[in-house]
Image (cartoon, rainbow, N blue to C red):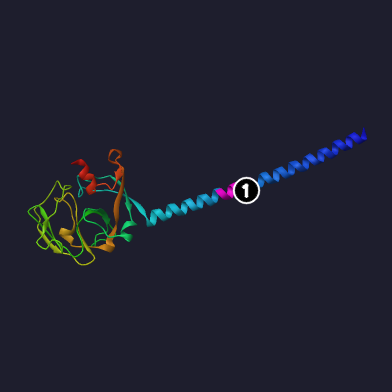
């Protein structure tokens, strides 16, 4: 009887050892999972902040200067990286800080490029450059509300000429002059709201070519 009891006790002690070992392994696994979770969270947060501050930023449109391409409360994601790698193009919709008030943001369309002469007259826009010394009439399918305001401006090597699509009410380069490149924040990359207008490169020339 005693022998049997001792054997049982020995077996019980062995089981307890197994249980302790199993518990230790389980704790180590839980600790590793926790460490993995926090490591993933920190990396995800850093990536998000990097994108938020250096790649893309949300903006809310306020005002009628870009009607009908953009309206008040349109929610946009603006690409802040592309123009660090390449130059803005004619027709791009950009968010910018106007030279006279750098605490504000405007949304406009690039019409004139560095070194060009831009003439706006009789509700038409003419571009003079190396390729077109005699000037060409700019095709602007995005403009529905034009104005009779006359402008003649020659740009410097790092300057752009921007206008709103609603020329009747837009306060733009016709009034305050050329836009230095460093004042361009980025281009409109994505429209998230309103949902029926959700899409990439909103207001871009590709969008208007699809409508025609």
Closer to us: 183 or 156:
156
Placement of the N terminus among the 4 image quadrants: top right
Residue 24 visible in image: yes
User: Would residue 151 be found to the left or right of residue 107 on screen?
Assistant: left
Name the residue at the left extreme: 122
Pointer 1 residue: 31
Q: Mark 1 falls on what kind of element?
A: helix
Placement of the C terminus among the 4 image quadrants: top left
Magenta region, main secondary structure: helix
Q: Residues within 10 Å of mark 1 (few under 14, many from 20)?
A: few
Q: Is residue 16 above or below residue 116?
A: above
Name the residue at the bottom extreme: 157
Q: Is residue 13 above or below residue 132?
A: above
User: Would residue 167 be found to the left or right of residue 17 on screen?
Assistant: left
Residue 87 image offset from top left, x and y in percent: 27, 60
Residue 75 image offset from top left, x and y in percent: 31, 46
Closer to us: 166 or 156:
156
The image quadrant of residue 101 is bottom left
Asked if the stretch drawn in magenta spans residue 75, the answer is: no
Magenta residue span = 29-36
The image quadrant of residue 135 is bottom left
């Amino acid at each position: 009887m005693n022998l049997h009891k001792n054997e049982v006790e020995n077996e019980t002690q062995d089981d307890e050892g197994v249980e302790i070992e199993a518990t230790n392994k389980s704790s180590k696994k839980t600790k590793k999972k926790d460490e993995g979770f926090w490591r993933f969270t920190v990396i995800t947060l850093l990536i998000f902040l990097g994108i938020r501050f250096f790649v893309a930023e949300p903006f809310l449109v306020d005002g009628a200067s870009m009607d009908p391409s953009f309206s008040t409360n349109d929610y946009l994601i603006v690409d802040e990286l592309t123009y660090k790698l390449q130059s803005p193009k004619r027709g791009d919709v950009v968010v910018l800080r106007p030279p006279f008030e750098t605490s504000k943001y405007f949304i406009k369309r690039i019409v004139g490029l560095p070194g060009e002469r831009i003439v706006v007259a009789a509700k038409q826009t003419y571009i003079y450059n190396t390729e077109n010394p005699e000037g060409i009439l700019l095709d602007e399918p995005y403009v529905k509300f034009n104005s009779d305001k006359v402008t003649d401006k020659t740009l410097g090597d790092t300057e752009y000429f921007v206008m709103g699509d609603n020329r009747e009410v837009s306060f733009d380069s016709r009034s305050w002059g050329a836009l230095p490149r460093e004042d361009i924040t980025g281009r409109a990359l994505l429209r998230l709201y309103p949902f029926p207008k959700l899409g990439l490169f909103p207001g871009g020339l590709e969008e208007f070519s699809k409508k025609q």
